[in-house]
Amino acid sequence: MLSSYGTDLTAPQSSSPSRQSDWATWLCLGAFIVLTATLATQHEMWRDEVRAFSVATHARSWWQLLHDLHEEAHPFMWYAVLPRLTATRAATLQLAVPVLAAIGGVIVLSEAVSLRLVISAVVILGGVGLAISYRKPTRAAKAFSRPSINLR
C-alpha cells in the first residue's frame, strides 16, 4: 500500500528518526535548564517586588503597615508575613501549592478523592510540616551536646 507521497506504508520503519527526535528533545531540555538556571541566578528584583519588600520592612507597627498599604494590590497578610519569611521557609511552603490546588479541584470542580491523592497530600504536608518545625540548635544546645574531654 502506498501513501499519497509514494512511500510504502507496509514496510518496516527505521528507528533513526525516533533517535534524532529523542536527541533533539534532550538537547532542548538541557538548553532550557541552563537558560533557566542562568536567569534565576542573575535575577534583579522587579519594581513590584521591591515595593512590597520595602513596605513590609519599613513599617514600625501594624498601624503604620496598614496606613502604608493604600493602593496596594497584595492583601494585608502578605505584608505581615513577608519580613518574617526566610527564603528556605518560602520555598518549603511552595511545596504545599499542589495540595491546595487538589483541594480546590475537589471542592470547586467536584473531583473524586482517591487514596492516591490522600496519601500524597499527607506525605507532602507532613514533609512541609517537618521542614517548617525544624529549628537550628542554639549555641547552648551545641555546647551541651559536645562531648567533654578530660586530659588527666
Image (cartoon, grey):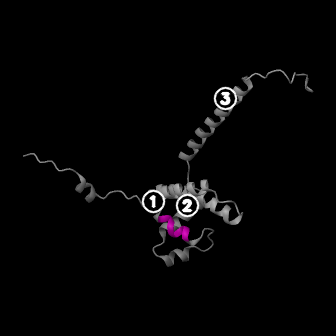
In x, y percent, where is residue 39? 58, 45
> What's the residue type where badge 1 is placed?
Ile
The residue singled out by tag 1 in the image is 132
In x, y percent, where is residue 42? 55, 46
What distance separates the C-alpha of mark 1 from that of mark 3? 41 Å
> What's the residue type where badge 3 is placed?
Trp
Question: 56 or 20: which is nearer to us?
Answer: 20
Q: Which badge, 1 or 3, is on the more N-terminal residue?
A: 3
Give residue 50's mark: 2
Q: Which badge, 2 or 1, is on the more N-terminal residue?
A: 2
Q: Is residue 73 above or below residue 126?
A: below
The residue singled out by tag 3 in the image is 23
Magenta stretch, overall SS: helix
Question: 31 or 140: which is nearer to us?
Answer: 140
Q: Is residue 65 above or below residue 52?
A: below
Q: Give yes or no for residue 81 being in the magenta stretch.
A: yes
Question: 68 or 145: which is nearer to us?
Answer: 145
Q: Give yes or no for residue 16 being in the magenta stretch.
A: no
Q: What stretch is highlighted in magenta?
A: 77-83
